[in-house]
Image (cartoon, grey):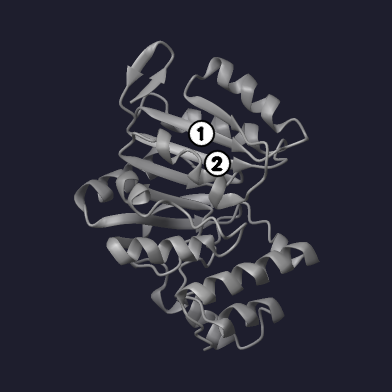
Amino acid sequence: MAVIGSKVVNVDVSLSVVTFNNSGIIKKLLNNIIDVFSNKVLFRVYVIDNGSTDGTVNICKKISMVNPEVQIIESVQNKGFGSGHNSILPLLDSKYHIILNPDISIESFTEIQKILDFMNLHEEVGLLSPLILNEDGSIQRLYKLQPTVLDLAIRFISPNFLKKRQKKFVRLDTGYDKIGPIDYASGCFMFFRTNILKKISGFDEKYFMYMEDADITRKVNDISRAVFFPCAKVTHTWMRESHKKIKYVLITLKSMWIYFNKWGWKFY
């Protein structure tokens, strides 16, 4: 149950977004969610802020004052992506839960309705990953296999290095137009069955950022099914910080170490 305004209601779809100095884009995201979901399903949006200093929280609070579906949670310590999302697990009473990045946009409720229809028909599916597009409409190649050390290493080197291997890792052979199992769903937009998300206790909080999405996909596949669903689409403004700054490279390497120590070192 959740309190929206003065009424206690059952929430059909909950959403969570973790923010850190996202003042330039968070208003657009929240307005998009409100526009898409209002008068379609009962929903609640949790914004978990990890200590922003740029006005992100004030923007969110202004929006929540006129949209009680938006709830702001301020964290005094930045413990990372997974920890932020996990912090609201005890609050969830929804049937479905969406984890999304601040740079996601949804064209219309039609895309969500396609996902809801599929999930309602397939109780065995615990996690769904839609088709994820760039702003120009091109496809982001995020229908990935379980990673090996080689797969992750060559993506750091060059998009032109061992191209055949890179194409295999992102499953270009599928054409990205067929529903199928997914080993490694992107954390930029994950559509969970809430009871499955709770059963696996959400993300492994040993990861600060990066690789926690590969990890949680494997946890879902251990007890349920994760699927790629190209019939529905969302748009993602992809910021490849891990390839730009040494700080993010080091975080990525640490996450890779955690992942392979946990799941086994598969080199190629």
| Residue visible at 34% across and 42% down in the picture | 96
Q: Where 16 sits versus 240, above or below? A: above
In the rendered view of the protein, which quadrant contains the N terminus?
A: top left
Q: Position of residue 175 (x, y in %)?
A: 42, 72
Q: Could you say where residue 234 lies in the image, as x and y percent from the top left?
A: 49, 49
Q: Secondary structure at mark 1?
A: strand
Visible residue check, residue 245: no
Q: From what the image shows, is residue 211 above or below residue 97? A: below
Amino acid type assigned to the residue bearing label 2 in the image: Val
Q: Position of residue 8 (x, y in %)?
A: 34, 17
Callout 2 crowding tier (Cα within 10 Å): few <14, some 14–19, many ≥20: many
- Seen from the viewer's position, the closer of residues 175 and 50 is 50
Contact check, label 1 and label 2, Cβ < 8 Å = yes
* Residue located beneath label 2 in the image: 17
Residue 2 falls in image quadrant: top left
84 horizontally vs 93: left or right: right
Which residue does the numbered mark 1 point to in the structure image? 46
Side (left or right) of 201 relative to 163: left
- At mark 2, the secondary structure is strand
Marks counted in the figure total 2
Residue type for callout 1: Tyr
Task: Measure how far apart labels 1 and 2 are at the Cα level.
Answer: 6 Å
Which residue is pictured at 35% across the width and 28% down the height? 40
Image coordinates of residue 158 in percent, x first then y, are: 70, 80
- Lower sequence index among marks 1 and 2: 2
Q: Residues within 10 Å of mark 1 (few under 14, many from 20)?
A: many
Q: Quadrant of residue 151?
A: bottom right
Question: Residue 130: which numbered mark, if any?
Answer: none
